[in-house]
Image (cartoon, helix red, strand yellow):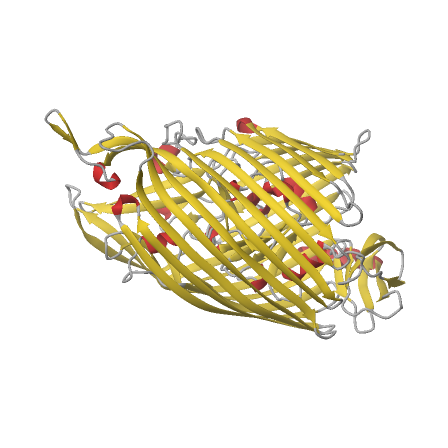
């Protein structure tokens, strides 16, 4: 906040006013046209008379961009040397563009929510082979981790302490979270960043248009964009741990003013920081579109295949100090193998200048397995008959097994936007999706095969999950205020049947119905600043493992979240500042407690009351044409007022005796750091050359909900540097050579982990596991645009 005040003081001496009027070709004023100066440094909308005004504009050159539904988005170069007035005319659009449709789904300044937008330029700079979570690594409240340690392969992130199962992700409006586990597995979409046009990150509950299951944060990812001109992009990266990425992107441009075709092929490989933690991945993106005067038809194919060596078990604490690359797995085919393809069909139509409608159809098949070597497995768990060798009866065997998943996800999402009056707008939408999944295990080899054959199934179960929602969103605007109301109903049906691993029979069926209202308010202090507040409710069903490890009598309850957000945003030519307070109250949050259910299995259990409260600050400050600074800070308290831990108790002969309850008060929620901060600067000594520095700090994270320092991740920090040279060469449009130096000081840190424990002969024993991240590493990138 002090930096923003300093910026205003420094530059107010050269402040001027830019005003004007926006009309159509008949000179009729256009109310509600969206006006941007320098891509969002200043933002406003026209009033009832089509007028707009920017105050405190500094001397310099600017780009003024005006957009309005049904009209072509136009831009003008403006040179500010004093107070200035402009008359702007918009032309009716010959074709409908994706930009208008995407903005209709996303949060904006009128919705009263906390969000950040990431544009194509920023995405391209991060597309060096690492998975999508690393795009958000420097954002407030974000912690990113990688199983293999360097960002290629299995990666994940947490936002405000909420893990991937609580971060709702959509791709072009279609849910991406796995229907059963609720996680997001970006490893199944290698080099996906190379096809991303923009992303909006909403912290907190978010809006219903971003998906039905938003519970802690949301990602709205868009790949659709109209590229009018043909292009060919060649992107190649290589670096530490034998990592490399090869990408070819090309597009036809607009053919006969109607048709476009975009395509991408990618290959990503890495040996991994962790021993044997290799990744071998390939992906395809293909998109064809037809653009009419008031219609868009898009068909997308997004396909990826991955083979990664398993490093998801982490490293035991007693080994970590002497071997940070340790991997307990040594079997050469201890791998995860999966292929997933997304087929998307998008239809959008501008019914009138104030009314549009869209529908998206989706079909996603996925199939794969992970293979593992197991020692001394009981015959009984695999349905094998004991055998005799001489006088010895054999009941256990070493074996190799594959655990398979074959699933299908399909459905639709639709919405319509209607500007009923100059001040009142409505969005009505909904979605329905069905998931079907087969889970089964195969024996591939056994030291003692008994009566089995290669490929025999030792378990099989299937699942059906239906997920539907309907919502109505309305926004009422005046020049100084906007009020937002969002009402969503959501229903879930889940059915799980068959035999699980170990021979347990599954017979689960559940129906749930949720009502999730949201309300927001925004007050525009000026065309550069606004205050906002919102109150929202979200609900979340248990995941697959919760159902598997429970019975009808011990089944967990759905979770509820009540989220209050309040903040301030300010933008200018030299400085952009945002600050917000949040309070997230959970009812029946599901956490690991160690408790056994009625059949002796450990499950997640409901904690009646818990909360997160915090403040998030972010500032970007342009010192001069060559220097800029940015910083963000998130400080929070993440608490469970009363938490009960259940510990298994064994005697000296390791015979189970009972479970012991240990009650804690005012404990910290696991893996929820109290402080997360980042700082960076950029220096451009030449127009074509830039140097960027970024540093991240994350405070202590507890591995469980007991606030025990003995079961925690130490605070850590790291710093990255990027050198980039960008300039057209010969007949190319542009050539970019970049050098990414990550963790330049070689910090030894872990970003994630887990723990479990027991009491043996009266002594507590805890087993902590950690995921160490790579020390100093680098990546060189060469990107050519033809």
What is the quadrant of the N terminus in the image? bottom right
Q: Where's residue 565, x and y in %?
A: 56, 65
* Residue nearer the viewer, 478 or 504: 504
Q: Is residue 513 left or right of residue 204?
A: left
Quarter of the figure that contains the C terminus: top right
Query: In the shown orientation, is residue 612 left or right of residue 316?
Result: right
x, y (%) of residue 458?
Answer: 29, 40
Judge left or right: residue 464 versus residue 525: left
Q: Residue furthest left?
A: 391
* Residue 720 locus on image (x, y percent): 60, 38
Residue 345 visible in the snapshot: yes
- The number of callouts visible is 0
Q: Residue at x 79, y 38 (%)?
A: 687
Q: Could you tell me residue 543's position as x and y percent?
A: 40, 55
Q: Residue at x 41, y 55 (%)?
A: 464
Q: Is residue 705 above or below residue 751?
A: below
558 and 547: which is toward the camera: 547
Whether residue 585 is visible: no
């Amino acid at each position: 906040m002090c930096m923003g005040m300093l910026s205003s003081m420094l530059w107010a001496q050269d402040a001027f006013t830019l005003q004007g009027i926006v009309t159509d070709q008949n000179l009729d004023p256009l109310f509600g046209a969206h006006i941007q100066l320098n891509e969002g440094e200043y933002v406003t909308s026209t009033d009832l008379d089509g007028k707009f005004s920017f105050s405190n504009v500094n001397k310099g050159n600017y780009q003024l961009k005006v957009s309005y539904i049904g009209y072509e988005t136009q831009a003008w170069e403006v040179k500010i040397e004093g107070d200035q007035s402009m008359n702007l005319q918009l032309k009716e659009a010959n074709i409908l563009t994706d930009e208008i449709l995407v903005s209709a789904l996303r949060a904006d300044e009128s919705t009263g929510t906390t969000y950040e937008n990431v544009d194509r330029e920023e995405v391209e700079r991060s597309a060096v082979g690492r998975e999508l979570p690393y795009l958000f690594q420097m954002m407030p409240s974000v912690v990113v981790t990688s199983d293999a340690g360097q960002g290629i392969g299995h990666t994940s992130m947490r936002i405000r302490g909420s893990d991937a199962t609580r971060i709702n992700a959509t791709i072009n409006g279609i849910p991406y979270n796995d229907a059963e586990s609720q996680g997001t597995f970006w490893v199944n979409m290698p080099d996906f960043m190379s096809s991303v046009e923009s992303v909006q990150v909403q912290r907190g509950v978010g809006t219903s248009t971003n998906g039905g299951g938003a519970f802690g944060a949301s990602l709205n990812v868009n790949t659709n964009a109209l590229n009018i001109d043909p292009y060919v992009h060649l992107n190649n990266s290589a670096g530490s741990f034998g990592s490399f990425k090869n990408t070819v992107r090309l597009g036809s441009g607009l053919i006969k003013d109607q048709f476009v075709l975009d395509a991408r092929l990618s290959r990503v490989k890495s040996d991994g920081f962790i021993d044997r933690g290799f990744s071998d991945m390939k992906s395809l993106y293909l998109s064809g579109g037809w653009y009419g005067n008031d219609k868009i038809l898009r068909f997308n194919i997004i396909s990826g295949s991955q083979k990664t060596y398993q490093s998801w078990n982490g490293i035991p604490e007693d080994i970590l100090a002497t071997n940070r690359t340790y991997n307990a797995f040594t079997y050469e085919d201890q791998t995860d193998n999966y292929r997933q393809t997304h087929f998307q069909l998008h239809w959008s139509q501008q019914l009138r200048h104030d009314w549009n409608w869209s529908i998206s159809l989706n079909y996603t098949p996925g199939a794969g397995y992970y293979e593992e070597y197991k020692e001394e497995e009981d015959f009984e768990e695999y349905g094998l008959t004991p055998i005799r060798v001489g006088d010895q009866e054999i009941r256990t065997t070493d074996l190799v097994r594959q655990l398979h998943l074959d699933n299908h996800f399909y459905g639709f999402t639709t919405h319509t936007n209607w500007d009923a009056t100059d001040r009142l707008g409505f969005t009505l939408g909904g979605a329905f999706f069905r998931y079907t999944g087969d889970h089964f295990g195969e024996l591939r080899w056994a030291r003692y095969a008994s009566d089995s054959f290669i490929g025999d199934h030792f378990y099989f179960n299937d699942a059906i999950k239906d997920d539907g929602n309907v919502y109505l969103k309305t926004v009422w605007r005046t020049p100084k205020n906007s009020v937002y109301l969002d009402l969503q109903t959501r229903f879930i049906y889940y059915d799980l049947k068959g035999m699980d691993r170990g021979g347990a029979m599954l017979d689960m069926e559940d129906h749930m119905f949720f009502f999730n209202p949201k309300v927001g308010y925004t007050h525009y202090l000026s065309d550069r600043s606004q205050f906002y507040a919102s109150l929202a409710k979200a609900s979340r069903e248990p995941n697959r493992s919760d159902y598997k490890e429970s019975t009808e009598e011990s089944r967990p309850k759905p979770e509820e979240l009540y989220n209050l957000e309040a903040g301030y945003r300010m933008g200018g030519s030299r400085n952009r500042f945002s600050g917000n307070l949040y309070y997230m109250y959970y009812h029946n949050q599901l956490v690991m407690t160690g408790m056994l259910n009625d059949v002796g299995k450990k499950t997640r259990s409901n904690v009646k009351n818990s909360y997160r409260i915090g403040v998030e600050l972010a500032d970007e400050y342009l010192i001069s044409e060559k220097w800029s600074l940015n910083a963000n800070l998130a400080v929070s308290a993440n608490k469970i007022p009363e938490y009960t831990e259940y510990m298994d108790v064994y005697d000296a002969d390791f015979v189970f005796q009972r479970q012991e309850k240990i009650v804690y008060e005012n404990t910290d929620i696991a893996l929820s750091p109290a402080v997360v901060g980042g700082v960076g600067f950029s220096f451009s000594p030449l127009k074509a050359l830039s140097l960027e520095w970024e540093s991240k700090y994350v405070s202590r994270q507890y591995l469980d909900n007991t606030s025990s320092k003995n079961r925690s991740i130490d605070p850590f920090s790291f710093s990255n540097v990027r050198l980039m040279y960008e300039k057209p060469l010969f007949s190319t449009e542009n050539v970019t050579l970049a050098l990414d130096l990550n963790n330049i000081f070689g910090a030894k840190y872990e970003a994630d982990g887990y723990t479990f424990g027991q009491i043996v002969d009266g002594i507590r024993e805890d087993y902590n596991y950690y995921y160490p991240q790579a020390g100093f590493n680098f990546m060189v990138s060469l990107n050519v645009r033809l």
